[in-house]
Amino acid sequence: MEEKLSRQVVYVEIDEEVTSVFDRIKTLRKKEILLVVPRKAILFQSGINLQILRKKMEEKGRKLIIVTTDRNGVHLAEKVGLSVLSRIEVEELKAPEEENPQVLIRPIQALRNEMPKEETPQRVAEKKMSIRELVQEFRMRDGGKKKGPESTYSLPISRPSRKVLTLILMISIGLFALIGYVAFPSATVYIRPKFDNLDFTVNVTMADKRLNQTLLQQNKPHVIASETVKTTTKQTKVFNTTSMEFSGQNAKGRIRIQNTENEPWPLKEGTRFQTEDGINFRIAKGVTVPGRTFDENQTVLPGVMVVNVEADPFDAYGQPVGDRGNIPSVRFHIPALSKFNQRLIWGEGEGPMVGGVTSYRAVVKKVDIEAAKKQIQDNLILMAKEDLRTYIDEINQLNKTHMVLMDDDRYLKTKLVDLRYADGLEGSYKDKFELFARIEAEGVAFDFDKLFEILKAEIGGRTHPDMQLRESSLAPENVGYEVIEEDPNAGQVKVTATLKGIEEFAIEPSTSAGVRFGSKVKEAIVGMDVSAVENWVGNLPEVDAVKVKTWPVWIHNIPRIPESIDIKLMEPEK
């Protein structure tokens, strides 16, 4: 179960480029990313797209899995070493029962009443001595100094009455029970304060430090230094040739076209008749199929015309046909027509299609070269972003800073400065071919720590006096920004920065608001029944949830001493 929860599903559009896909999945934290890709997607135009994604996600410690029914996509994914699924299996997950976060918490007052181990009475192995025996032993030890009849003197001691001892014991037990009833019991009220999600925004100006030295020296509160960073990225890539030149034989045969419409149905030259498997057969000449007629019993007789057809070299999915076109007599539909019209006119084989021979070879065409150019440029842009970030990391390590690259494509400028491939490449019969490209990239970096400090200072100064910010919610990953204005000449970019956080009522005794809240609650609930306390406290405007624990556990009322009541925060839900 834990393994399945570590997956995340991402759906890819049919026209979505590899750069867009990578930008969407690069920040995902799941160990496995399931990429659901539709048939005929641009992503499947070449295995290079998938190879780029696999390499980049492996560098981030993520496993990429392709989910598709596209046969070409399955072939390319398996060729570059990606796992492939035809569908996503979803299991019903049953959430485990949450344990009460307070079960293991014991009230502080309860611990005060426990006797330390070293003070616990221990059984003495030696024989106990009575007072009479002690006196006699003393007399015997002192006998060496005093001689005479006094040495045989014994002190007469009377045994106390049993009734007196019983009375003293009962009084002691009663006093102990009274003290325990008043002082020993304790109660802990666990409270989860009410909270609210905050989206706090502030306008910040990012000023290029080379062009805005005077402005930055003024230390204005909402101005952050930025700088332009540049890198050069180059790569030589080998591409698989996807274009094929068919050199075999196409299957041929005859089709009986049937028209159930009243009017004749003209079909132009090259009209396709397609099987359920996507194999197309075409007519060589245009024909007009006669309309339907009726016999003497008024039974409909479709108009019929028998024509010669020949299979296309490639099927509807771009795969070579060849001997796959040698099929028995089957029904054909005309894919260019609507579903409704396909029921009115169709074709049926006049015997099997024969003569198909599979033989084809890869040929580098202009479309292959253009596709390779685009792919290598897209790949270099991704690499350039990583090179810029690597360069910024080196600057941070050297200067002990925390500069980050502005994540906005408008401020990532790339220029293709070199693109080369072999002469005479177009039209050559090669399974693979090679391209070399080099680009220059330029981005804007800014001090992220400074931006984070500005946001925390602003949001911290705007909370309600009775509320506080949950520190754990103020995390760097909750920071976002959006460009609202740009002045290229001045080297300034104004952004609206947003910090998401959680504001909750302060009930901890470490704050003045928490002290006031605790005093109010303790004074109101002393001596109350536990269920009544939970109902009363739960209705307070500051409280989201409440749970009361008493010690000893059989106590059903809150102690009458406020000092025996503790107010604590519930542990956060996981």
Image (cartoon, rainbow, N blue to C red):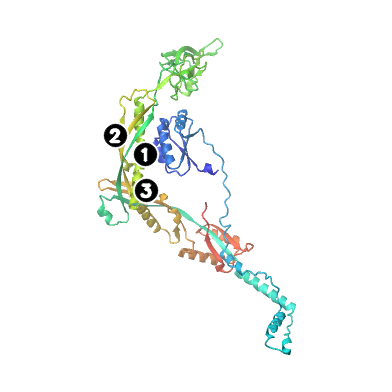
Report x, y in % for residue 448.
36, 51
Q: Residues within 10 Å of mark 1 (few under 14, many from 20)?
A: some
Tag of residue 418: 2
Q: Amino acid at mark 1?
A: Leu
Mark in front: 2 vs 1: 2
Residue 114 is at least partly visible in this image: no
* Res 22 seen here: yes
Q: Secondary structure at mark 3?
A: strand
Q: CA distance from mark 1 to mark 3?
A: 22 Å
Left or right side of 168 for 30: left
Q: CA distance from mark 2 to mark 1?
A: 17 Å
* Disc 1: which residue: 382
Decide which of tag 2 and tag 1 comes sooner along the chain.
Answer: 1
Mark 3 or 2: the one toward you: 2
Q: Which mark is residue 414?
A: none
What is the CA distance from the residue labelled 3 to the residue labelled 2? 34 Å
Residue assigned mark 3? 481
**Furthest residue toward top:** 296
Q: Amino acid at mark 2?
A: Asp
